[in-house]
Amino acid sequence: MKKVRILVVDGQGGGMGRAIVERLRREFSDSIELFAVGTNATAAQAMMKAGADAAASGESAVIYNSRKADFIIGPIGILAGGSMLGELSPAMAEAITGSEAEKILLPLNRCGLQVVGVADEPLQTRLDQLIDLLRANLAAEYPNV
């Protein structure tokens, strides 16, 4: 049976991506394929240490893995070229937005993007919300996860 392929994208030090990977691994164990792509090697390494099945870094890795993912998870800035202090290229953002994968984004205001109606909440609260949303999406299409 094909496992659900989840791609986590992060940049800079990879702290948010690390927290996402740790939580996904804890919640879903080995019932998912968990791939991590960092905009740089430091972010990729942090997510790999957190429990990703595989990790890579750079523009080519984002473009390639975005095509293969069932879900893409990361901060809202992964949709905006030039975000993450310029680490996320326009080609990376285009690959993510153009992917057929369902995107689950954490609306953190550090990327220069603000979403109306979204309260500023701690990362742990956002991770709880992410897991709830992912579970709802998985229940519809992937009942074995």
Image (tube, grey):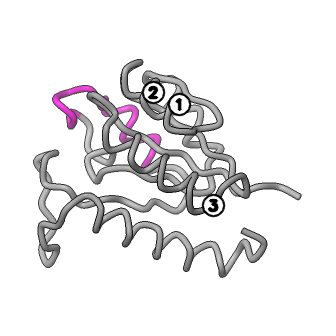
**Amino acid bearing label 3:** Phe
Per the image, the residue denoted by label 3 is 28
> Residue 88: x percent and y percent?
30, 31
> Residue 73: x percent and y percent?
45, 53
> Residue 109: x percent and y percent?
13, 54
User: Residue placed farthest to the top in the image?
Assistant: 41
**Residue located at (43% from left, 41% from top):** 9
**Residue located at (16% from left, 29% from top):** 85
Disc 3 on helix, strand or loop? Answer: helix
Residue 48: numbered disc: 1
Density class for disc 3 (Cα within 10 Å; few <14, some 14-19, many ≥20) is some
Q: Marks 1 and 2: CB-CB under 8 Å?
A: yes
Density class for disc 2 (Cα within 10 Å; few <14, some 14-19, many ≥20) is many
Of the residues tagged 3 and 2, which is closer to the observer? 3
**Residue located at (45% from left, 45% from top):** 96
Per the image, the residue denoted by label 2 is 44
The quarter in which the N terminus is drawn is bottom right
125 above or below 35?
Answer: below
Disc 2 on helix, strand or loop? Answer: helix
- Which residues, given as a range, are shown in magenta? 82-96
**Residue located at (58% from left, 52% from top):** 25
User: On the rendered structure, is 78 left or right of 3?
Assistant: left
Q: CA distance from mark 3 to mark 2?
A: 20 Å
Q: CA distance from mark 1 to mark 3?
A: 16 Å
Q: Earlier in the sequence, mark 3 or mark 2?
A: 3
Magenta includes 95? yes
104 above or below 84?
Answer: below
The quarter in which the C terminus is drawn is bottom right
**Amino acid bearing label 1:** Met
